[in-house]
Amino acid sequence: METNRPSLPEVLHPTDVELATTLDLCNMGLSHLPAEISKAKKLERLYLTGNQLTDLPDWIASLGRLQELYLGYNSLRSLPFEMGRLKRLRVLVLQNNQLETLPESIGQLGHLEKLSAHSNHLAHLPERIADLKNLRVLNVKLNRLAKLPERLGRLIKLERLLIDSNPIAQLPQGLGQLKNLMELDMGSQNMATLSDEIWQLKKLIWLFLDNNGLNSVPDGVRHLKMLEWLFINDNRISELPVFLLRHKYLRRVNVANNPLSPNGRAMFEKYPVFTNEMAFER
């Protein structure tokens, strides 16, 4: 027999809230953040995924111990400027909302390690994102970004940069300074040419160049000595260069949906490094 989930008043019993370090209010149908949460001064993790929130109250900044905030799959249109006061925040998850901008104050979150804002309506990112010196993951896929912050290269601890499916025409100068970057997902872009700075990312393991209108495999790939996974599917590539076979660490090259020539097709069929697999678990 199916049991009913506790009602909101039961979940937010005053005593429980005041002592809580974690609150899980996912999929509760919340249209606003209950004021009782403001009393949770010991709160470190707040899960609000899958509700109907359209905004956050300014008092969210009073949760001074908060380290992880999950707001995905709501209807948020904006974030309060006061968010910048959450100095201990390490994880901020905002995917699948209706955000058009992020506040400049986000640059004050000096301990932030993960910022996930994919599947929103972001037309630009605040320049102060470049101040997030501890950021390791930046996921802004599936937005409306025409460009990235000019100082993006200052994110020296960044390991994963996911910008897939944005109308970005050109990458910012200084991208090659991301010396710790291991994953770059820049599929489905609007770039006429690829920046040479990509080939300076010596620790890159994952590179996604799918659906970019490429006519050939970029020669710069040969300089990515640590590369293991290369996605060049859904392009216009007819030939496969031999240097891919000589690459020391390359484990998979996805070439699906390319118009391979007879020579390209013969290489594809001969060597197991090439694959038509479109998706896999990471």
Image: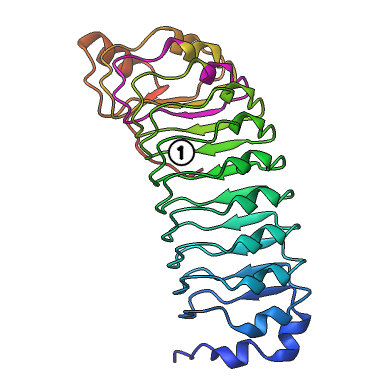
Residue 181 or residue 130, whichever sits in front: 130
The quarter in which the N terminus is drawn is bottom left
Residue 205: % across, % down: 56, 27
Is residue 112 visible in this depiction of the protein? Answer: no
Residue 97: % across, % down: 43, 61
- Residue 213 shown in magenta: yes
The residue lying at 48 percent from left, 73 percent from top is 53
Q: Examine the residues drawn in magenta and state their main secondary structure.
A: loop
Residue 159: % across, % down: 62, 35
Residue 253 or residue 216, whichever sits in front: 216
The residue beneath circle 1 is 163
**Up-down relation of residue 75 to residue 165 (above or below):** below
**Up-down relation of residue 266 to residue 151 (above or below):** above
Q: The magenta stretch spans which residues?
A: 197-219
The quarter holding residue 254 reads top left
The residue lying at 41 percent from left, 41 percent from top is 145
Name the side, left or right, on which 157 lies relative to 244. Answer: right
The crowd level at tag 1 (other Cα within 10 Å; few <14, some 14-19, many 20+) is many
The residue lying at 54 percent from left, 12 percent from top is 223
Residue 110: % across, % down: 73, 48
- Give, as a three-letter code, the residue at label 1: Ile
Q: How many marks?
A: 1
**Up-down relation of residue 161 to residue 179 (above or below):** below
- Residue 178 shown in magenta: no
Is residue 100 visible in this depiction of the protein? Answer: yes
